[in-house]
Image (cartoon, grey):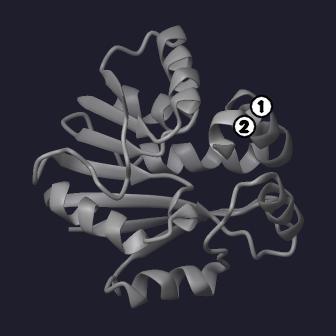
Amino acid sequence: MFWDKFAFVYDLFENAYNGKVNKEVPRIVADLIFPADEVLECACGTGMFSLHIAPKCKSLTATDFSPNMLAKAKKKLTRAGITNTILEFADITSLKYEDNSFDKIVAGNVIHLLDDPLSAMKEFERIIRPGGMIIIPTYLTYSEQSKGAASFLNKLGANFRQRFDMESYRKFFSDMGYPNVQYRVAEGRMPCCVAIIRR
């Protein structure tokens, strides 16, 4: 799997190419998390968001489909002394959690990789509590400055199923039945848009 192979250099690439955005976006997400929240993070990768979410919430369940990404995230969280987080292997389109289990769900930089993103959204709807929030940051890979990097990652095997600019990202959610989504954008070499869906 590409993400298992890429796990050991992922942070180096991300920080060298897109460091400004990757500092800002976790702060945007963390600002939406509150002390009483029980949070599910899907596709936690090496823990870029986890490190900012965990100190803000009651508990964090951080999941990924790549064992090597999870191993990197575990090292980071342990090094940071974070103790309110469980790391688990999980398939974002078929989650084992019970209905109404979480106050917030974060799925960072993964929706564009899925064959069936609607299946993931249905799972999020099932396990989010009434009044909760689904937070989906996604890189905008059709911006002029990011096309080259996205094409390079695809050649390596990242296999993006969708590529978005701001207009197509809005349409993506509208077409799935989410017309009232809020968006916050972190600008940089590869901009990232955080979609915020309140339930």
Is 111 positioned to the left or the right of 125 in the image? right
Q: Nearer the viewer, residue 24 or 87?
A: 87
* Image spot of residue 34 (x, y percent): 28, 41
Q: Secondary structure at mark 2?
A: helix
Q: Amino acid at mark 2?
A: Phe
Q: Secondary structure at mark 1?
A: helix
Observer able to see residue 57: no
Is 100 positioned to the left or the right of 63 in the image? left
Mark 1 crowd level (few <14, some 14–19, many ≥20, 10 Å Cα): few
The reply to whether callout 1 and callout 2 are in contact (CB within 8 Å) is yes
- In the picture, the disc for residue 9 is 1
Q: Nearer the viewer, residue 98 or 23?
A: 98
Q: Residue at x 48, y 11 (%)?
A: 78
Q: Residue at x 27, y 60 (%)?
A: 124
Which circle, 1 or 2, is nearer the viewer?
Answer: 2
Q: Residue at x 78, y 38 (%)?
A: 15
